[in-house]
Image (cartoon, coloured by chain):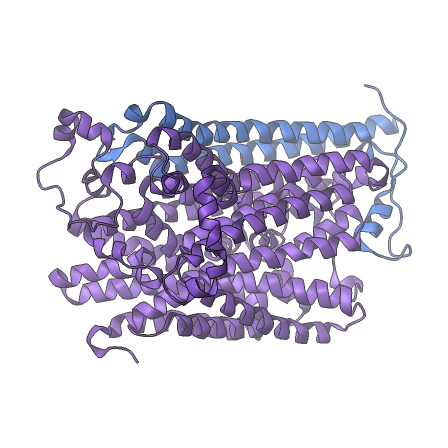
Amino acid sequence: MILKKAPEISLGGVARSLLHLSPMSHQNPDHDDFIHSEEFLHHLMRRQLRLSIACAAAFLILLFGLPVANYLAPDFMAQRVGGFTLTWLILGVLFFPFVWIIARIFITRSMALEEAEVLLAAEGNEKRKA
Amino acid sequence: MPEAASFDYWILTFSAITVIVTIWMGFRSAKTSKSASDFFVAGRSVSVGWNASAISGEYLSAASFMGIAGMVMLSGYDALWYPVCYACGYLFLLLFIAGPLRRFGAYTIPDFAEGRYDSPVFRKIAVCFVLFIGFFYTMPQMKGAGTTLAYIFPGLPYWVGVAVIGAVITLNVALGGMKGITLVQAVQYWIKMFAISVPIFVLLSVYGGYGENLSVNQSAADVASPPALVQTVEPGTPQRLALPEKAPADEAWIAPFGPLTTKAATAAGLSPEESKPLSLLYTFSLIVALVCGTAGLPHILVRFYTNPDGVAAKKTTMWVMILIGVFYVFPPVFGVLGRNFLPELYAATGSKGPDKVVLELPILIREKYGILGSILSGITCAGAFAAFMSTFSGLLVSMTSALAHDVYGRMLRPNSTPAQRMAMFKWCAILIGGVSVILGALVEPLEINFMVGQAFAIAAASYFPLLFMSVWWRGMTMKGAAVGMLTGGLSALVAATLVNASTLALDKGPMGRLFAGFGGMNDFWKEYPLLRILAEQPAIWSVPLAIGLMIVVSKATKKTIPEDIRMKMLVLHAPEKLGLKQEYIEEHQGMGH
């Protein structure tokens, strides 16, 4: 693993800029650690984005696919299922549980991801200290 | 004065109880909200269950409670995109925005805009859209209020209803703040859920199932293949009343690409084949507006800051999706039943038209079951009150916070004391309430749900790109964000306003005379149906325009990327356990806001 030079930015500095506090309000913590590194941030964002995009793709394919199916196969989508047309049943009833499932998967995975990232950060810090 | 003959005390009683309970809770919790922090984000101490109910309560507006049913009745299948995307838009919020935004820690979107770019100037730009989106969103709520009061008190002018409800809610917000609202909103969700579902179960047991009632409408496929029809239409299928001339035909109503999405093409005299691609474009644009718009609604986003942490923010979103998803199954059922059993609404317009189907439909069973019909209609009226009161309250808090917290507290009088800001909050509430009433009185001829869709389109082209790009792209600069948000949001705003003005010009009442100057635009729309669709549903071009401009301008102004961008991104994305979470505004740290 290539460890880059420690960043110039400090948590205290950001806290000040975010909080608009005077420089006296916060002491700078150790900012040479792995948590504050470019490497950690890059890793973090990439994994989060990958998960979000995968879930979004599952959602968008059905969402935009349904009008396309209505356009290309109107008779198929108009067949009756229990009085509903197939497309009405999908859009008016079945779509909701489909989205709940995606949301559930996302939340479970993203919480697991956060746990993993906390561990990774702790390990990274230890390594850097060593 | 109300006409005694059609005045129903049950309906009045249920509605009055809802209003009184809402106001009582507002006043009661006003006593417990002391500090400015209590006012703005409820002391950030709301549990997941309460917060999810409160978000749902605030979100389910007159559009959801009354407008969707009205639009399904009027336009059929195409209107289903609204409830589905209103609910599913939360997924986008969950996937891309909810967690990071909560970790960053700020009261409002303008807070986020300033903190992310270290730019007080950008805050001033960002705050405009709280007001733009807010006013677009309050207009349909006001129409819901005027319609409901005109239903309860037959003969009462529409604008009186708007003014009375506007005044009551404004007073409530001015005295209670958001702490009151959180509790009120949560309770109101459950009132709405009860009010939309119970009457439906009763109506379906009397008039036959959802599918059965839908099967009365024959699609082109049914006509082409009669055997299928024989299989599905059971003996005893509900017999519907005759449809008036103004009602859309079955084939157009039940099929995709019906009256809603083909309106512009039909007006231009295009053939069904020619209009179909335009309808597909309309549908796509509507989906983009609603899905992206949900993630950019200021009065909803502000609630994510009332979660204790990012994990709670995600859990809250999940529960919101379940709570509102279950709700949204019901309104279209009212639309379907309304088409079969209240077809006379097709002939009326404004507050007497299909937008009141939810209120009036339960009355039908009065013939069979007497007083039960009145009680159920009273319940749906109570739900309608809960709907426009809760959403209008939430919008009023957001818009008033923007004025009191941002414009007054930061721009005009940065040194004002908390007491001065609290006083200003009340005056701002009254000002915004007044403007909302005036705007609401103008829009009687427009459909409730359609107007809310436009508010979503503006949010989709302004705040959504801002939040999405600021959270995920570190290369964004303040200039890029500002140019993209302003251009996208304003162009959507102008396009939507032009369409509304030209629609109002067609009204036969006083609004038609007021907006007569825009009448010529309707000829232009007939000439260019594509442009009409792009103006009516601007999201499909305005969202990419906003994001594109953000990228181009940010690249050109690369040097102004905030110096501590890495740390900002860490605060947005790193798990809170790492201790990088920062609270943006903490009163007790002596911020003086």
Tell me if I can see residue B319 in this picture: no
Tell me if I can see residue A130 in this picture: yes
* Residue at horizontal 72 percent and vertical 46 percent from the top: B482
Quadrant of the frame with the N terminus of chain A: top right
The x, y position of residue B525, in whole percent, is 46, 44
Kindly indicate the quadrant of the structure image that contains residue B263: top left
Compared with B449, B516 (above or below) is below
* Residue at horizontal 83 percent and vertical 50 percent from the top: A17
Compared with A23, B90 (above or below) is above
Compared with B160, A19 (above or below) is above
In blue, which chain?
Answer: A
| Label tally | 0
Quadrant of the frame with the C terminus of chain A: top right
Task: Tell which of B57 and B560 is nearer to you.
Answer: B560
Task: Tell which of A120 and B16 is nearer to you.
Answer: B16
The x, y position of residue B31, in whole percent, is 57, 75
Most extreme residue toward the left is: B235
Please indicate whether residue B555 sits to the left or right of residue B265 in the image. right
Compared with B22, B518 (above or below) is above
Most extreme residue toward the top is: A1
The x, y position of residue B196, in whole percent, is 33, 55
In purple, which chain?
Answer: B
Kindly indicate the quadrant of the structure image that contains residue B175: bottom right
The x, y position of residue B177, in whole percent, is 58, 68
Task: Tell which of B258 and B25 is nearer to you.
Answer: B258
